[in-house]
Image (spheres, rainbow, N blue to C red):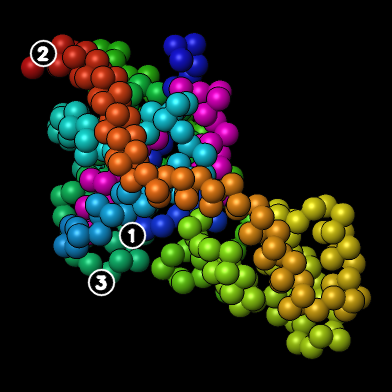
Amino acid sequence: MADKKRILSGMRPTGPLHLGNLLGALANWVNMQDEYDCYFFIADWHALTSDYDNTAPIENNRKEIMLDWLSAGLTPEKSTLFVQSMVKEHAELFLLLTMITPVPWLERNPTYKEQIGALSNKDLSTFGFLGYPVLQAADIIIYRPYGVPVGVDQAPHVEITREIARRFNHFYGEVFPEPATILTETPKILGADRRKMSKSYGNAIFLSDSPDDIRAKVSGFITDPQRARRSDPGNPDVCNVFDFHQLYTDPDSVKEIDAQCRSAGIGCVECKQKMAEGLVNALAPIREKRAYYEARPEMVDEIMVEGSNRARKAACETMEVVREAIKI
Ligand code: TRP
Ligand code: SF4
Protein backbone atom coordinates (compact mmCIF):
# COMPACT_ATOMS: atom_id res chain seq x y z
CA MET A 1 0.00 0.00 0.00
CA ALA A 2 3.05 2.22 0.40
CA ASP A 3 3.09 3.16 -3.29
CA LYS A 4 -0.54 4.26 -3.30
CA LYS A 5 -1.65 7.74 -2.43
CA ARG A 6 -3.67 7.91 0.75
CA ILE A 7 -7.20 9.30 0.85
CA LEU A 8 -9.56 9.66 3.77
CA SER A 9 -13.24 10.40 4.21
CA GLY A 10 -15.97 9.94 6.78
CA MET A 11 -19.70 9.97 7.39
CA ARG A 12 -21.73 10.79 10.44
CA PRO A 13 -23.83 7.81 11.63
CA THR A 14 -27.20 9.53 11.43
CA GLY A 15 -29.27 6.69 9.94
CA PRO A 16 -29.53 4.25 7.06
CA LEU A 17 -27.89 5.20 3.77
CA HIS A 18 -30.01 5.82 0.69
CA LEU A 19 -29.43 5.87 -3.06
CA GLY A 20 -28.41 9.53 -2.91
CA ASN A 21 -25.62 8.61 -0.47
CA LEU A 22 -24.64 5.65 -2.64
CA LEU A 23 -24.38 7.64 -5.87
CA GLY A 24 -23.06 10.80 -4.23
CA ALA A 25 -20.30 9.24 -2.15
CA LEU A 26 -20.23 5.56 -1.38
CA ALA A 27 -20.07 4.17 -4.93
CA ASN A 28 -17.20 6.54 -5.53
CA TRP A 29 -15.38 5.31 -2.42
CA VAL A 30 -15.87 1.71 -3.53
CA ASN A 31 -14.26 2.54 -6.87
CA MET A 32 -11.32 4.31 -5.26
CA GLN A 33 -10.33 1.27 -3.22
CA ASP A 34 -8.02 -0.18 -5.86
CA GLU A 35 -6.25 3.01 -6.76
CA TYR A 36 -5.75 4.53 -3.31
CA ASP A 37 -4.74 3.60 0.20
CA CYS A 38 -8.19 4.33 1.61
CA TYR A 39 -9.22 5.33 5.12
CA PHE A 40 -12.98 5.53 5.68
CA PHE A 41 -14.42 6.19 9.09
CA ILE A 42 -17.65 6.64 11.00
CA ALA A 43 -17.64 10.10 12.58
CA ASP A 44 -19.59 9.25 15.73
CA TRP A 45 -18.16 12.13 17.77
CA HIS A 46 -19.38 14.44 15.04
CA ALA A 47 -22.88 13.00 15.49
CA LEU A 48 -22.74 14.38 19.04
CA THR A 49 -22.22 17.96 17.87
CA SER A 50 -25.91 18.28 16.97
CA ASP A 51 -27.44 15.27 18.76
CA TYR A 52 -25.78 15.54 22.16
CA ASP A 53 -29.20 15.36 23.84
CA ASN A 54 -30.16 12.08 22.17
CA THR A 55 -27.21 9.71 22.01
CA ALA A 56 -29.14 6.44 22.26
CA PRO A 57 -29.40 5.80 18.48
CA ILE A 58 -25.72 6.38 17.75
CA GLU A 59 -24.48 2.90 18.64
CA ASN A 60 -26.99 1.17 16.42
CA ASN A 61 -26.54 3.69 13.62
CA ARG A 62 -22.84 2.96 13.71
CA LYS A 63 -23.48 -0.73 13.06
CA GLU A 64 -26.03 0.09 10.38
CA ILE A 65 -23.72 2.36 8.49
CA MET A 66 -20.88 -0.16 8.59
CA LEU A 67 -23.32 -2.76 7.28
CA ASP A 68 -24.32 -0.37 4.49
CA TRP A 69 -20.67 0.22 3.63
CA LEU A 70 -19.80 -3.47 3.52
CA SER A 71 -22.95 -4.24 1.51
CA ALA A 72 -22.06 -1.58 -1.03
CA GLY A 73 -18.60 -3.09 -1.51
CA LEU A 74 -16.20 -1.41 0.87
CA THR A 75 -13.98 -4.15 2.23
CA PRO A 76 -11.42 -4.38 5.03
CA GLU A 77 -9.21 -6.29 2.60
CA LYS A 78 -8.68 -3.13 0.59
CA SER A 79 -9.49 -0.26 2.96
CA THR A 80 -9.03 0.75 6.55
CA LEU A 81 -12.60 1.00 7.86
CA PHE A 82 -12.79 2.45 11.34
CA VAL A 83 -14.65 4.39 14.01
CA GLN A 84 -13.59 7.87 15.09
CA SER A 85 -14.26 7.34 18.81
CA MET A 86 -12.10 4.20 18.78
CA VAL A 87 -9.04 6.26 17.84
CA LYS A 88 -8.67 8.67 20.77
CA GLU A 89 -5.70 10.38 19.13
CA HIS A 90 -8.20 12.37 17.04
CA ALA A 91 -9.26 14.05 20.29
CA GLU A 92 -5.70 14.91 21.27
CA LEU A 93 -4.95 16.49 17.92
CA PHE A 94 -8.30 18.30 18.04
CA LEU A 95 -7.33 19.83 21.38
CA LEU A 96 -3.99 21.02 20.02
CA LEU A 97 -5.59 22.44 16.87
CA THR A 98 -8.14 24.41 18.93
CA MET A 99 -5.22 26.37 20.38
CA ILE A 100 -4.25 27.78 16.99
CA THR A 101 -7.62 28.11 15.24
CA PRO A 102 -8.99 31.67 15.21
CA VAL A 103 -12.66 31.73 16.23
CA PRO A 104 -13.64 34.05 13.31
CA TRP A 105 -12.61 31.31 10.85
CA LEU A 106 -15.26 29.10 12.44
CA GLU A 107 -17.91 31.79 12.70
CA ARG A 108 -17.46 32.59 9.01
CA ASN A 109 -17.92 28.96 7.96
CA PRO A 110 -20.95 28.84 5.60
CA THR A 111 -22.06 25.41 6.84
CA TYR A 112 -22.11 26.68 10.41
CA LYS A 113 -24.34 29.63 9.62
CA GLU A 114 -26.60 27.52 7.45
CA GLN A 115 -27.04 24.76 10.03
CA ILE A 116 -27.71 27.15 12.89
CA GLY A 117 -30.53 28.57 10.75
CA ALA A 118 -31.84 25.20 9.50
CA LEU A 119 -31.81 23.46 12.89
CA SER A 120 -33.32 26.33 14.85
CA ASN A 121 -35.24 23.84 17.04
CA LYS A 122 -31.93 22.77 18.58
CA ASP A 123 -29.59 24.70 20.83
CA LEU A 124 -26.43 24.69 18.75
CA SER A 125 -24.74 27.54 20.58
CA THR A 126 -22.17 25.08 21.90
CA PHE A 127 -18.41 25.08 21.79
CA GLY A 128 -18.46 21.64 20.14
CA PHE A 129 -20.74 22.69 17.32
CA LEU A 130 -18.68 25.77 16.54
CA GLY A 131 -15.58 23.59 16.65
CA TYR A 132 -16.98 20.97 14.27
CA PRO A 133 -14.50 21.85 11.49
CA VAL A 134 -11.54 21.70 13.90
CA LEU A 135 -12.42 18.13 14.82
CA GLN A 136 -12.84 17.39 11.12
CA ALA A 137 -9.43 18.92 10.43
CA ALA A 138 -7.93 16.66 13.10
CA ASP A 139 -9.69 13.62 11.57
CA ILE A 140 -8.12 14.41 8.25
CA ILE A 141 -4.59 15.61 8.86
CA ILE A 142 -3.81 12.99 11.52
CA TYR A 143 -3.53 10.56 8.56
CA ARG A 144 -1.62 13.04 6.39
CA PRO A 145 -3.66 12.07 3.31
CA TYR A 146 -3.12 13.23 -0.22
CA GLY A 147 -6.82 14.09 -0.56
CA VAL A 148 -10.35 13.93 0.80
CA PRO A 149 -13.21 12.75 -1.44
CA VAL A 150 -16.31 14.76 -0.47
CA GLY A 151 -19.41 16.35 -1.94
CA VAL A 152 -19.54 20.12 -2.49
CA ASP A 153 -21.29 20.60 0.84
CA GLN A 154 -18.12 19.51 2.64
CA ALA A 155 -15.69 21.53 0.52
CA PRO A 156 -15.61 24.50 2.96
CA HIS A 157 -14.57 22.11 5.74
CA VAL A 158 -11.66 20.78 3.74
CA GLU A 159 -10.69 24.36 2.95
CA ILE A 160 -10.62 25.21 6.68
CA THR A 161 -8.58 22.03 7.19
CA ARG A 162 -5.95 23.31 4.76
CA GLU A 163 -5.86 26.66 6.54
CA ILE A 164 -5.42 25.01 9.92
CA ALA A 165 -2.68 22.72 8.55
CA ARG A 166 -0.89 25.73 7.08
CA ARG A 167 -1.10 27.60 10.39
CA PHE A 168 0.22 24.61 12.29
CA ASN A 169 3.15 24.29 9.89
CA HIS A 170 3.82 28.02 10.22
CA PHE A 171 4.19 27.79 14.02
CA TYR A 172 5.77 24.37 14.47
CA GLY A 173 7.41 23.36 11.18
CA GLU A 174 6.30 21.32 8.18
CA VAL A 175 4.34 18.45 9.70
CA PHE A 176 1.15 18.34 7.66
CA PRO A 177 0.74 18.26 3.88
CA GLU A 178 -2.31 20.27 2.80
CA PRO A 179 -4.99 17.79 1.71
CA ALA A 180 -6.65 18.21 -1.67
CA THR A 181 -10.42 18.31 -2.08
CA ILE A 182 -11.45 15.48 -4.39
CA LEU A 183 -14.91 16.61 -5.44
CA THR A 184 -17.52 13.92 -5.90
CA GLU A 185 -20.27 14.72 -8.36
CA THR A 186 -23.69 14.90 -6.82
CA PRO A 187 -26.21 12.54 -8.40
CA LYS A 188 -28.89 13.63 -10.80
CA ILE A 189 -31.58 11.54 -9.14
CA LEU A 190 -34.15 13.03 -6.79
CA GLY A 191 -36.45 11.56 -4.18
CA ALA A 192 -39.98 10.23 -4.71
CA ASP A 193 -41.41 13.77 -4.46
CA ARG A 194 -38.76 15.30 -6.79
CA ARG A 195 -37.00 17.03 -3.92
CA LYS A 196 -33.41 16.18 -3.02
CA MET A 197 -33.33 12.63 -1.66
CA SER A 198 -33.12 12.83 2.10
CA LYS A 199 -33.98 10.64 5.06
CA SER A 200 -35.75 13.53 6.75
CA TYR A 201 -38.03 14.20 3.77
CA GLY A 202 -39.31 10.61 3.79
CA ASN A 203 -38.67 10.38 0.03
CA ALA A 204 -35.64 8.08 0.03
CA ILE A 205 -34.91 4.57 -1.21
CA PHE A 206 -32.56 2.93 1.26
CA LEU A 207 -29.85 0.41 0.44
CA SER A 208 -31.51 -1.83 3.01
CA ASP A 209 -34.97 -1.69 1.36
CA SER A 210 -36.41 -5.03 0.26
CA PRO A 211 -37.52 -5.53 -3.37
CA ASP A 212 -41.12 -5.02 -2.28
CA ASP A 213 -40.24 -1.82 -0.40
CA ILE A 214 -38.58 -0.57 -3.58
CA ARG A 215 -41.58 -1.49 -5.78
CA ALA A 216 -43.99 0.22 -3.39
CA LYS A 217 -41.87 3.37 -3.14
CA VAL A 218 -41.34 3.62 -6.90
CA SER A 219 -45.08 3.28 -7.54
CA GLY A 220 -45.51 6.45 -5.49
CA PHE A 221 -42.94 8.46 -7.47
CA ILE A 222 -44.06 11.74 -8.99
CA THR A 223 -43.59 11.67 -12.80
CA ASP A 224 -43.88 14.40 -15.44
CA PRO A 225 -46.27 16.75 -13.58
CA GLN A 226 -47.80 17.92 -16.89
CA ARG A 227 -48.92 14.40 -17.77
CA ALA A 228 -52.34 14.13 -16.17
CA ARG A 229 -53.92 11.30 -18.20
CA ARG A 230 -52.65 8.07 -19.68
CA SER A 231 -53.52 9.43 -23.13
CA ASP A 232 -51.39 12.59 -22.66
CA PRO A 233 -47.91 12.42 -24.12
CA GLY A 234 -45.19 12.78 -21.47
CA ASN A 235 -41.79 14.39 -21.32
CA PRO A 236 -39.05 12.12 -20.00
CA ASP A 237 -36.64 15.07 -19.77
CA VAL A 238 -38.48 16.40 -16.74
CA CYS A 239 -39.31 13.02 -15.22
CA ASN A 240 -37.42 11.67 -12.23
CA VAL A 241 -38.47 8.10 -13.09
CA PHE A 242 -36.70 8.51 -16.40
CA ASP A 243 -33.51 9.66 -14.66
CA PHE A 244 -33.60 6.38 -12.75
CA HIS A 245 -34.16 4.46 -15.99
CA GLN A 246 -31.01 6.02 -17.39
CA LEU A 247 -29.06 4.59 -14.49
CA TYR A 248 -30.70 1.23 -14.00
CA THR A 249 -32.34 0.10 -17.28
CA ASP A 250 -30.51 -1.22 -20.35
CA PRO A 251 -29.83 1.48 -22.97
CA ASP A 252 -32.04 -0.01 -25.72
CA SER A 253 -35.05 -0.12 -23.42
CA VAL A 254 -34.30 3.42 -22.28
CA LYS A 255 -34.52 4.63 -25.88
CA GLU A 256 -37.77 2.80 -26.34
CA ILE A 257 -39.24 4.24 -23.16
CA ASP A 258 -38.19 7.72 -24.22
CA ALA A 259 -40.08 7.39 -27.53
CA GLN A 260 -43.10 5.64 -26.01
CA CYS A 261 -43.44 8.25 -23.28
CA ARG A 262 -43.48 11.07 -25.82
CA SER A 263 -46.17 9.34 -27.90
CA ALA A 264 -48.27 8.20 -24.94
CA GLY A 265 -47.40 4.65 -25.94
CA ILE A 266 -46.55 3.70 -22.38
CA GLY A 267 -48.33 4.62 -19.16
CA CYS A 268 -46.53 5.83 -16.07
CA VAL A 269 -47.69 2.86 -14.01
CA GLU A 270 -46.07 0.39 -16.39
CA CYS A 271 -43.03 2.60 -16.83
CA LYS A 272 -42.49 2.74 -13.07
CA GLN A 273 -42.86 -1.02 -12.79
CA LYS A 274 -40.10 -1.48 -15.36
CA MET A 275 -37.88 0.96 -13.54
CA ALA A 276 -38.49 -0.72 -10.19
CA GLU A 277 -37.42 -4.08 -11.64
CA GLY A 278 -34.23 -2.58 -13.03
CA LEU A 279 -33.47 -1.00 -9.69
CA VAL A 280 -34.27 -4.17 -7.74
CA ASN A 281 -31.85 -6.07 -9.99
CA ALA A 282 -29.13 -3.45 -9.76
CA LEU A 283 -29.24 -3.58 -5.97
CA ALA A 284 -29.17 -7.39 -5.80
CA PRO A 285 -25.41 -7.63 -5.10
CA ILE A 286 -25.83 -5.14 -2.26
CA ARG A 287 -28.68 -7.18 -0.77
CA GLU A 288 -26.61 -10.35 -1.03
CA LYS A 289 -23.66 -8.88 0.83
CA ARG A 290 -25.99 -7.43 3.44
CA ALA A 291 -27.54 -10.85 4.07
CA TYR A 292 -24.04 -12.29 4.49
CA TYR A 293 -22.95 -9.71 7.07
CA GLU A 294 -26.31 -9.57 8.84
CA ALA A 295 -25.90 -13.26 9.58
CA ARG A 296 -22.45 -12.51 11.06
CA PRO A 297 -22.80 -9.47 13.35
CA GLU A 298 -19.64 -10.39 15.28
CA MET A 299 -17.72 -10.09 12.03
CA VAL A 300 -18.96 -6.52 11.55
CA ASP A 301 -17.86 -5.63 15.11
CA GLU A 302 -14.48 -7.19 14.45
CA ILE A 303 -14.02 -5.21 11.23
CA MET A 304 -14.62 -1.98 13.17
CA VAL A 305 -12.18 -2.92 15.94
CA GLU A 306 -9.44 -4.18 13.63
CA GLY A 307 -9.81 -1.24 11.26
CA SER A 308 -9.58 1.13 14.22
CA ASN A 309 -6.45 -0.64 15.45
CA ARG A 310 -4.88 -0.17 12.04
CA ALA A 311 -5.92 3.48 11.89
CA ARG A 312 -4.58 4.08 15.42
CA LYS A 313 -1.14 2.94 14.35
CA ALA A 314 -1.02 5.57 11.63
CA ALA A 315 -2.52 8.21 13.94
CA CYS A 316 0.01 7.45 16.69
CA GLU A 317 2.90 7.87 14.29
CA THR A 318 1.66 11.33 13.37
CA MET A 319 1.10 12.26 17.01
CA GLU A 320 4.73 11.39 17.83
CA VAL A 321 5.82 13.90 15.21
CA VAL A 322 3.26 16.46 16.41
CA ARG A 323 4.35 16.28 20.06
CA GLU A 324 7.94 16.58 19.00
CA ALA A 325 7.14 19.62 16.85
CA ILE A 326 5.16 21.38 19.61
CA LYS A 327 7.66 20.24 22.25
CA ILE A 328 5.02 19.08 24.69
N1 TRP B 1 -18.61 16.38 8.15
C1 TRP B 1 -18.73 15.14 7.41
C2 TRP B 1 -20.21 14.95 7.02
O1 TRP B 1 -21.08 15.47 7.66
C3 TRP B 1 -18.26 13.97 8.19
C4 TRP B 1 -16.81 14.05 8.49
C5 TRP B 1 -16.25 14.18 9.71
C6 TRP B 1 -15.73 13.97 7.55
N2 TRP B 1 -14.90 14.17 9.62
C7 TRP B 1 -14.54 14.08 8.32
C8 TRP B 1 -15.67 13.87 6.17
C9 TRP B 1 -13.30 14.04 7.69
C10 TRP B 1 -14.42 13.84 5.55
C11 TRP B 1 -13.24 13.93 6.31
O2 TRP B 1 -20.46 14.22 6.09
FE1 SF4 C 1 -41.97 9.44 -16.67
FE2 SF4 C 1 -42.20 7.03 -17.68
FE3 SF4 C 1 -44.38 8.48 -17.14
FE4 SF4 C 1 -42.79 9.15 -19.14
S1 SF4 C 1 -43.99 7.27 -18.97
S2 SF4 C 1 -43.65 10.55 -17.62
S3 SF4 C 1 -40.77 8.60 -18.36
S4 SF4 C 1 -42.90 7.68 -15.67
Q: Nearer the viewer, residue 114 or 78?
A: 78
Q: Nearer the viewer, residue 324 or 45?
A: 45
Residue at coordinates 70% horizontally, 75% vertically from top-left? Answer: 223
* Any part of residue 40 in sight: yes
Q: Are marks 1 and 3 in contact (CB under 8 Å)?
A: no
- Could you say where residue 175 lies in the image, as x and y percent from the top left? 29, 15
Residue indicated by mark 3: 121
**Residue 104, magenta (yes or no):** no
- Could you say where residue 242 lies in the image, as x and y percent from the top left? 74, 64
- Judged from this view, the residue extending furthest toward the left is 328
- The residues bearing labels 1 and 3 have C-alpha atoms spaced at a distance of 11 Å
Q: Is 189 situated above or below 301?
A: below
Q: Residues within 10 Å of mark 3 (few under 14, many from 20)?
A: few
Residue at coordinates 43% horizontally, 65% vertically from top-left? Answer: 199
Q: Residues within 10 Å of mark 1 (few under 14, many from 20)?
A: few
Name the kind of residue labelled 2 in the image. Answer: Lys
Name the kind of residue labelled 1 in the image. Answer: Gln
Q: How many marks?
A: 3
Q: Which mark is residue 115?
A: 1
Name the kind of residue labelled 3 in the image. Answer: Asn
First in sequence: mark 2 or mark 1?
Answer: 1
Q: Residues within 10 Å of mark 2 (few under 14, many from 20)?
A: few
* Any part of residue 159 in sight: no
Which quadrant is home to the C terminus?
top left
Q: Regarding mark 2 in the picture, which secondary structure is present there?
A: loop
Residue at coordinates 37% horizontally, 44% vertically from top-left? Answer: 296
Position of residue 12 in the picture relative to residue 315 (left or right): right
Q: Which mark is residue 142?
A: none
- Could you say where residue 95 lies in the image, as x and y percent from the top left? 15, 33
Q: Nearer the viewer, residue 307 or 142?
A: 307
Residue indicated by mark 2: 327
Q: Which residues are magenta?
A: 23-51
